[in-house]
């Protein structure tokens, strides 16, 4: 591509015009489609095949070596090279990638998948897809090599023809996987350094794996591999981290494209509950926006058209398989292509039509809403006022985020309009054939909707009823005894409305309890609605609860009859989702690495309410169950907790540990908050949560800002008051230690000396935790000695005026560890 900075005067303007001419002849309404068509027609160029030796280049922390082989470039698309292939198909041919993750945790992660903390892999081939300056960089290095070694092999069109015939179908497959991103970058006039580089590498030992460098993301470098388990696809992230220039402050991740000022959604369901909707985003650009605008929406939705300030604009939507697996399988990206740039300092109305089938029947008038958070388009989750209008069959009830401000009937359909009284980041809805009940407490109203019938998945299976022969029937002379008859009998179906009033009272009580601790939620009214399945979800002013929570405990499925599951569906789930009215809907996070905070705080808030309702022993039992779940081992003896730090979020959900994300995020997350509470004491912990809600109301917080806030409420005389060691061990690392405590007391009162030792095991040598030892005396206050563990036994001494009544390690269950109680202590002889 011709760069105008290298050419001066009139000639520069003429050449630049020629370079841009292919775009100029494309009509404004077809630029993306034409670019995509050019991508699908593109192929490797046999005339651009080169024999290369000792060719190397880097992408920040990663270095690539084409030791000996061939490089072939794809034909340009819109004047830009976007792909190339390297193969080692010569005698002694080889390629190599070198990568050293900068953090210990990432090196451990890499080793878990590759058996090595460094990536030093030789490869047979590497297919590259890019919109940065890779092609020019490689071509310049090839030309430089030719100048230095004139006799070195150069172009090889014959080999190029062979490679093109073999690799073109593969190249097209990868083009289709990254088609949306390629079209976006080809249309947007961004500097090459801001664009992405992707490589599919055929390793000699590790097999096929992926390398991604994307300056637009918070972690610019990602290496991983597609994997399959039990019919499901995973992208196993081997390592992911900030690139060198970003870590050192030389570059910053891309800022938000715009500020969302308002969101209006007009949604209509037909008689078959197919959704047709229009979402209007009122946006204010942060800087000039040119080219294509990427947005996200559920893959179940199609986007047929869009308008900008009333003017039709082009929409480009494709299903990009590999990109979806790397980013996450639920969302798809589509592009809106304005006909002119969007300028900062003014507002625009971006209207997007979208339609699809996201509501499915679970039987007997029960419906399941899929794509609950992605049923309408969005770019970034930002707080804004929402207005939603729904048109739906009048035989159904519909609940949604916001207060109902209009309600009318149009023939067989009902129309309701909802408005939020406070800014929200996203909106949801639910619908069905409902009964409902209300409850109020402390100025807050809870309205619970329940299905009139139970979904088919929860209906009990028919049980055989045995009919015995009547007593006294003659049997002499009969060739065989009378038959015992078994006929199937349908047991009575569970009643999904049996607990409506009780559930409303429970949620209202939980809401009032949390408001007294955290401050006011965004809304004074909360709607509760059922969803088939074993989960819940919290939206602003609206929560989903598993239908199981609605059932009488005796009528729940067998799988939920165990004590822990009963407690979950009767007490924890509804309190957890109610807590999201604060954690996620008042205070939010902006990056996936910090999402654990919202789930951990919500889950621990539910445990706080459980503690108030049922006592501390029940809460301790739940935490003990969480610890046992985290310590469960897989076939290779690895604990679930060791899958990775909690900040990895959905990275934890891999083919090695499919359940790790949920267990670590919710259960270890609750432990982390619990440990902070024990370090602070309740007198500081609860004011800290209230301040968190006040200071970050309708704002986002990250993990480091949360640590800084917690430090403000730490007692001044405790070790690790800045919590750097605490967060390094429990948030950014893994490991649950086993702690053995022994002690002895020597001397005579009032000059006794207590010596205690804490020995740590089952963790890495660099693991270190602070654990309290409580020394209770008959007279005077209880003494707390904080002991820092390590790879060697940690010993402490304490002078005592009298014999202790009790010496106990972690008396208040404030450390996530396996603890061995001391045996009979050695006491001084009298």
Image: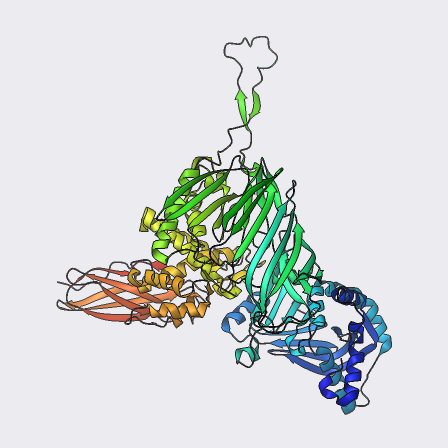
Q: Residue furthest right?
A: 158
Residue 233 pos. (x, y %):
64, 56
Q: Residue at x 43, y 57 (%)?
A: 582
Q: Is residue 232 left or right of residue 777?
A: right
Render colour scheme: rainbow
Q: Residue at x 13, y 67 (%)?
A: 749
Count of numbered labels shown in the rendering: 0
Residue 207 pos. (x, y %):
67, 66
Please tell me whether residue 408 is drawn above or below residue 734 in the rendered image.
Answer: above
Q: Is residue 367 left or right of residue 821?
A: right
Quadrant placement of the N terminus: bottom right
Residue 205 pos. (x, y %):
66, 69
Q: Nearer the viewer, residue 407 or 256?
A: 407
Rendered image quadrant of residue 433? top right
Q: Is residue 525 visible?
A: yes
Q: Is residue 568 left or right of residue 28?
A: left
Residue 15 pos. (x, y %):
79, 83
Q: Is residue 250 left or right of residue 14?
A: left
Q: Is residue 115 visible?
A: no
Q: Nearer the viewer, residue 125 or 409?
A: 409
């Amino acid at each position: 591509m011709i760069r105008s900075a290298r050419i001066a005067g009139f000639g520069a303007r003429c050449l630049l015009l020629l370079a841009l001419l292919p775009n100029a002849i494309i009509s404004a309404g077809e630029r993306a489609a034409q670019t995509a068509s050019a991508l699908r027609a593109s192929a490797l160029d046999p005339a651009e095949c080169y024999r290369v030796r000792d060719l190397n280049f880097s992408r920040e922390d990663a270095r690539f070596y084409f030791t000996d082989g061939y490089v072939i470039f794809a034909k340009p698309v819109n004047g830009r090279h976007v792909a190339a292939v390297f193969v080692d198909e010569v005698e002694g041919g080889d390629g190599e990638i070198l990568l050293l993750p900068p953090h210990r945790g990432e090196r451990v992660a890499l080793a878990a998948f590759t058996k090595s903390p460094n990536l030093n892999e030789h490869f047979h081939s590497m297919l590259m897809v890019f919109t940065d300056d890779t092609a020019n960089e490689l071509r310049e290095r090839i030309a430089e090599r030719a100048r230095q070694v004139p006799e070195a092999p150069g172009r090889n069109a014959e080999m190029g023809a062979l490679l093109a015939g073999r690799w073109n179908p593969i190249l097209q497959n990868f083009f289709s996987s990254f088609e949306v991103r390629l079209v976006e970058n080809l249309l947007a006039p961004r500097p090459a350094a801001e664009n992405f580089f992707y490589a599919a590498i055929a390793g000699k030992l590790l097999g096929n794996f992926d390398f991604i460098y994307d300056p637009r993301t918070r972690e610019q470098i990602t290496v991983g591999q597609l994997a399959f388990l039990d019919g499901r696809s995973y992208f196993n992230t081997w390592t992911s981290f900030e690139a060198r220039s970003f870590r050192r402050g030389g570059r910053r991740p891309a800022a938000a494209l715009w500020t969302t000022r308002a969101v209006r959604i007009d949604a209509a369901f037909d008689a078959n509950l197919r959704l047709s909707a229009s979402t209007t985003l009122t946006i204010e650009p942060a800087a000039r926006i040119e080219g294509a605008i990427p947005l996200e929406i559920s893959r179940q939705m199609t986007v047929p058209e869009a308008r900008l300030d009333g003017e039709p604009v082009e929409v480009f939507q494709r299903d990009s398989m590999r990109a979806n697996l790397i980013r996450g399988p639920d969302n798809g990206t589509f592009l809106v292509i304005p006909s002119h740039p969007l300028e900062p300092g003014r507002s625009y109305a971006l209207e997007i039509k979208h339609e699809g089938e996201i509501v499915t029947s679970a039987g007997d008038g029960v419906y399941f809403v899929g794509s609950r958070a992605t049923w309408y388009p969005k770019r970034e989750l930002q707080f804004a006022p929402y207005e939603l209008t729904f048109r739906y069959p009048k035989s159904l009830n519909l609940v949604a985020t916001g207060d109902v401000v209009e309600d009318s009937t149009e023939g067989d359909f009902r129309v309701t309009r909802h408005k939020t009284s406070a800014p929200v980041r996203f909106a949801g809805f639910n619908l069905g054939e409902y009964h409902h009940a209300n409850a109020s407490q402390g100025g807050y109203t809870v309205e619970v909707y329940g299905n009139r019938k139970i979904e088919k998945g929860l209906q009990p299976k028919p049980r055989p009823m045995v009919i015995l022969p009547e007593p006294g029937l003659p049997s002499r002379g009969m060739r065989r005894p009378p038959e015992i008859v078994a006929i199937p009998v349908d047991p009575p179906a569970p009643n999904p409305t049996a607990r409506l009033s009780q559930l409303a009272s429970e949620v209202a009580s939980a809401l009032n309890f949390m408001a007294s601790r955290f401050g006011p939620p965004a809304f004074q009214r909360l709607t509760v609605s059922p969803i088939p399945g074993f989960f819940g979800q919290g939206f602003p002013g609206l929560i989903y609860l598993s239908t199981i929570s609605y059932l009488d405990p005796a009528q729940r499925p067998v799988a939920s009859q165990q004590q822990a599951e009963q407690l979950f569906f009767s007490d924890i789930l509804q309190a957890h989702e109610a807590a999201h009215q604060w954690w996620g809907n008042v205070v939010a996070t902006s990056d996936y690495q910090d999402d654990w905070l919202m789930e951990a705080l919500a889950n621990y808030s539910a445990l706080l309410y459980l503690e108030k309702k049922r006592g501390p022993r029940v809460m301790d039992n739940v935490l003990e169950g969480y610890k046992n779940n985290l310590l469960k081992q897989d076939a290779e003896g690895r604990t679930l907790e060791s899958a990775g730090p909690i900040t990895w979020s959905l990275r934890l959900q891999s083919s090695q540990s499919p359940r790790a994300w949920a267990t670590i995020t919710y259960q270890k997350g609750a432990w982390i908050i619990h440990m902070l509470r024990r370090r602070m004491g309740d007198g500081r912990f609860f004011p800290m949560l209230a301040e968190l809600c006040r200071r970050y109301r309708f704002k986002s917080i990250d993990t480091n800002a949360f640590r800084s806030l917690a430090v403000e409420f730490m007692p001044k005389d405790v070790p690790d008051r800045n919590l750097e060691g605490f967060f390094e061990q429990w948030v950014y690392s893994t490991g649950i230690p086993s702690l053995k405590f022994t002690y002895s007391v020597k001397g005579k009162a009032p000059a006794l000396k207590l010596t205690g030792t804490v020995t740590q095991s089952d963790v890495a040598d660099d693991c270190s935790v602070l654990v309290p030892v409580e020394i209770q005396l008959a007279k005077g206050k209880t003494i707390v000695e904080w002991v820092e563990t390590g790879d060697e036994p940690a010993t402490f001494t304490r002078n005592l005026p009298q014999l202790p009544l009790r010496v106990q390690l972690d008396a208040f269950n404030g450390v996530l560890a396996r603890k061995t109680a001391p045996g009979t202590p050695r006491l001084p002889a009298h």
